[in-house]
């Protein structure tokens, strides 16, 4: 699967807006799971009190957070997420300009970064594996 720059841009813009409001959304997060490596997954509620976002808190394992827009993934029928270097939700919001966008070929188990570099999901860090799995779960 080859994702266009426009698609990556749409995912990126959606994630950027979501990250920019992360500090304010923290009160509306529900803990979903903690993976075997210590990455914590949260679902965030949107304006209609339904789950709109997925956050993976990898601050303890990777010094990063990821975010994915459930609505955008469903709308585009493509999985993706943004990664921001941060140790808290507030820091994630402040560091939104440093977000890196990743798109996922869920069927082939490949991650593509915003520069077009592709890697197998099995070769990615546990943080990226969890972030990708949660984004792909939206499509299932």
Image (spheres, rainbow, N blue to C red):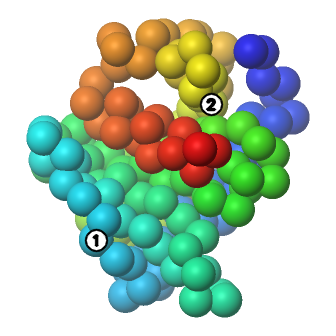
Judge whether residue 99 can be spotted in this image.
Answer: no
The correct choice, above or below, for 82 with respect to 69 in the image is above
Residue count near mark 1 (Cα–Cα under 10 Å), binned few <14, some 14–19, many ≥20 = few
Locate residue 17: give its quadrant: bottom right
Which is more foreground, mark 1 or mark 2?
Answer: 1
Residue ID at (34%, 39%): 130
On the image, the x and y values in percent for residue 121 come to 42, 18
Task: Work out which quarter of the rendered image holds the C terminus and state it.
Answer: top right
On the image, the x and y values in percent for residue 22 come to 47, 72
Please tell me which of labels 1 and 2 falls first in the chain: 1
Give the numbered dot on residue 31: 1
The correct choice, above or below, for 136 with respect to 89 in the image is above
Residue ID at (13%, 47%): 38
Read off the residue under disc 2: 103
Locate residue 90: give its quadrant: bottom left
Task: Work out which quarter of the rendered image holds the N terminus and state it.
Answer: top right
Is there a contact, CB below 8 Å, between mark 1 and mark 2?
A: no
Q: Is residue 122 left or right of residue 25?
A: left
On the image, the x and y values in percent for residue 138 come to 58, 50
Q: Nearer the viewer, residue 9 or 54?
A: 54
On the image, the x and y values in percent for residue 33 come to 25, 59
Residue count near mark 2 (Cα–Cα under 10 Å), binned few <14, some 14–19, many ≥20 = many
């Amino acid at each position: 699967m080859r994702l266009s720059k426009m698609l990556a841009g749409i995912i990126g813009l959606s994630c950027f807006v979501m990250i920019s409001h992360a500090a304010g959304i923290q009160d509306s997060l529900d803990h979903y799971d903690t993976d075997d490596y210590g990455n914590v997954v949260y679902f965030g509620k949107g304006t209609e009190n339904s789950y709109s976002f997925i956050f993976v808190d990898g601050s303890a394992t990777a010094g990063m957070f990821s975010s994915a827009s459930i609505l955008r993934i469903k709308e585009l029928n493509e999985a993706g997420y943004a990664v921001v270097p941060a140790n808290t939700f507030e820091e994630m919001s402040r560091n939104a300009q440093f977000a890196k966008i990743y798109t996922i070929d869920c069927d082939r188990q490949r991650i593509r970064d915003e520069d077009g570099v592709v890697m197998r999901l099995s070769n990615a860090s546990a943080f990226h594996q969890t972030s990708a799995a949660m984004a792909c779960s939206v499509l299932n």
